């Protein structure tokens, strides 16, 4: 009898917890609403970004068992518009103590790998790093014949092994002109990327390497080599090599001749896709139709405090999708990043504010867009309870984000990294555009035509739902778009 009672109590407790969890999931303090977060547990880098059959896949570094880094596996979510995500079962789980680290995915419609040929359906092939803790990292492949829902590991793994402890994050694409697969993969401690080629995805030949260059202060991770359109020059393209010198990111722009990357960026300067504290491991989508612009997604975090940020059942957030192009400004090629169009076409409330410098929203999930004149003095706008101050000095062309007054996360590393600035590249025109995406604890600021982006986590003790323009700087009209929640 006693035994039955215990079972009854256990079952009731289970149902009580699930009900509680359903009630609170996605309503937690600081939980982003239109940025992807896993329902539960930890995420870091986006992995295997690939578009196939109308579906955007977002695989991600995931601990399926807790909200701290560990048991690395590939989580999986899909979306038809890059905003509304549906989380699916873990796609590639940790195997024994071997972690499934970051990597990419390709479609193999011509069966170069020989996988799945008999079924006549293009296999999706994942290329990832198998991590044997403190001993070896090598590149492995696995294929899926059901749109990434389940993967079968190649029996001949590893496909690339240098016998090194640090050798990771393979990003593979099909290079049409030379009819071969190209892999960028990092030697993190040497601050070097290597480029390999393959006809089969199973055997790889070293072609060239690049680095150290630019920011060499941290280890190098998560390489990506991709082709982007030149803004305003239809039919023209450049190659971008983008990567993560921990804990930030940088890019180089130039050419790729099928064998090596030829850098045209000034090697004595550092160019970043994001000048804020929290943008890492961003990579671009593979297999997009030719008419689409390249799109990237990054992890909104910083390894200096990633494990400690206030979260809940989940920890870790992906950025909004960004479309990419480049433009030469003065002597420099600059990466332009803009919020994917899908964010603008959502059927949500749009408000135009024409005179009120204190803008109060119902919740902290919105986009604000305004322009500041460049002929008048310094400007400032604050978000929440002065949780984030955004400043623009037209004279020096400097833009900064400052979260030093925010009190919701008391952590030394986080507080040390509170002010971030950069100078707008090139001449200013009469007005400069600002687009601010606010999502509970995530703030992404796009300046101009995407020449500068600042991504920050901001943990307000109250809420980020108010925007207060300071002083005489007129930002009007300010357009506010509610963004709300997009979880299926
Ligand atoms: C980057 C990174 C990668 C590695 C993964 C492990 O954030 O350190 O180099 O593959 O995370 O989770």
Image: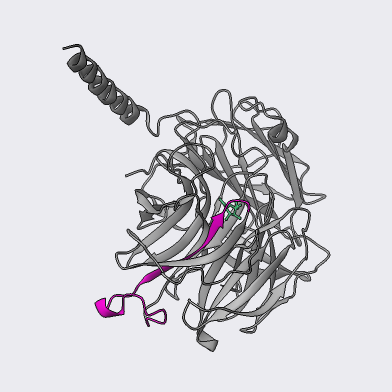
Eyeballing the image, is 456 above or below 256? above
Left or right of 426: which side holds 346? left
Residue at 67% of width from left, 44% of height from top? 277
Number of marks in picture = 0
Q: Residue furthest top?
A: 2
Q: Residue furthest left?
A: 1
Q: Is residue 416 visible?
A: yes
Give x and y (percent) for residue 411.
68, 29
Q: Is residue 471 visible?
A: no
Eyeballing the image, is 447 above or below 124? above
Q: Residue furthest bottom?
A: 178
Left or right of 47: which side holds 276? right
Residue toward you, 355 or 460: 460
Eyeballing the image, is 92 above or below 53? above
Residue toward you, 310 or 444: 310
Quadrant placement of the C terminus: top left
Give the color scheme: rainbow, by chain, secondary structure or one colour.
Answer: one colour
Per the rendered image, the range of residues in magenta is: 110-134
When asked about the image quadrant of residue 3, the answer is top left
Give x and y (percent) for residue 26.
40, 34
Quadrant placement of the N terminus: top left
Residue toward you, 227 or 200: 200
Residue at 82% of width from left, 50% of height from top? 396
Left or right of 167: which side holds 74? left
Residue at 70% of width from left, 27% of height from top? 405
Residue 356 lies in the magenta-colored region: no
Residue toward you, 254 or 58: 58
Residue 122 lies in the magenta-colored region: yes
Give x and y (percent) for residue 158.
51, 68
Give x and y (percent) for residue 403.
68, 34
């Amino acid at each position: 009898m006693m035994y039955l009672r215990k079972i009854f109590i256990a079952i009731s407790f289970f149902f009580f917890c699930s009900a509680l969890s359903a009630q609170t999931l996605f309503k937690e303090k600081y939980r982003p609403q239109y940025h992807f977060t896993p329902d539960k547990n930890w995420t870091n880098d986006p992995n295997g970004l690939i578009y196939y059959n109308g579906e955007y896949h977002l695989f991600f570094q995931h601990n399926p068992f807790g909200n701290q880094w560990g048991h690395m596996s590939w989580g999986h979510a899909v979306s038809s518009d890059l905003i509304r995500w549906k989380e699916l079962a873990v796609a590639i789980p940790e195997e024994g103590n071997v972690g499934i680290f970051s990597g990419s995915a390709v479609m193999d419609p011509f069966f170069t790998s020989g996988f799945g040929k008999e079924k006549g359906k293009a296999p999706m092939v994942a290329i990832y790093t198998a991590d044997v803790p403190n001993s070896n990292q090598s590149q492995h492949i696995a294929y899926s014949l059901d749109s990434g829902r389940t993967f079968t590991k190649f029996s001949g793994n590893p496909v690339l092994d240098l016998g090194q402890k640090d050798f990771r994050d393979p990003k593979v694409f099909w290079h049409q002109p030379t009819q071969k697969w190209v892999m960028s993969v990092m030697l993190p401690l040497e601050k070097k990327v290597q480029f390999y080629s393959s006809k089969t995805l199973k055997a790889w030949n070293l072609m060239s390497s690049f680095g150290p260059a630019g920011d060499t202060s941290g280890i190098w991770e998560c390489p990506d080599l991709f082709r982007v359109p030149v803004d305003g020059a239809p039919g023209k393209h450049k190659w971008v090599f983008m990567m993560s010198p921990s804990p930030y990111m940088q890019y180089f722009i130039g050419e790729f001749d099928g064998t090596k990357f030829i850098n045209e960026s000034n090697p004595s300067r550092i160019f970043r896709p994001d000048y804020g504290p929290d943008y890492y491991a961003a990579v671009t989508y593979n297999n997009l139709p030719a008419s689409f612009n390249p799109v990237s997604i990054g992890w909104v975090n910083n390894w200096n405090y990633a494990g400690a940020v206030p979260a809940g059942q989940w920890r870790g957030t992906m950025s909004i999708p960004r479309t990419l192009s480049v433009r030469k400004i003065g002597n420099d090629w600059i990466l332009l990043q803009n919020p994917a169009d899908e964010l603008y076409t959502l059927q949500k409330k749009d408000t135009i504010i024409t005179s009120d410098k204190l803008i109060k929203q119902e919740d902290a999930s919105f986009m604000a867009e305004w322009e500041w004149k460049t002929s008048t003095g310094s400007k400032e706008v604050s978000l929440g309870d002065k949780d984030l101050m955004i400043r623009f000095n037209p004279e020096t062309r400097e833009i900064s984000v400052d979260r030093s007054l925010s009190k919701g996360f008391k952590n030394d590393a986080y507080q040390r990294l509170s002010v971030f600035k950069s100078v707008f590249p090139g001449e200013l025109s009469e007005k400069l555009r600002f687009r601010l995406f606010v999502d509970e604890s995530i703030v992404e600021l796009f300046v101009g035509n995407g020449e500068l982006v600042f991504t920050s986590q901001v943990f307000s003790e109250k809420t980020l739902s108010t925007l207060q323009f300071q002083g005489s700087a007129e930002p009007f009209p300010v357009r506010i778009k509610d963004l709300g929640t997009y979880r299926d």
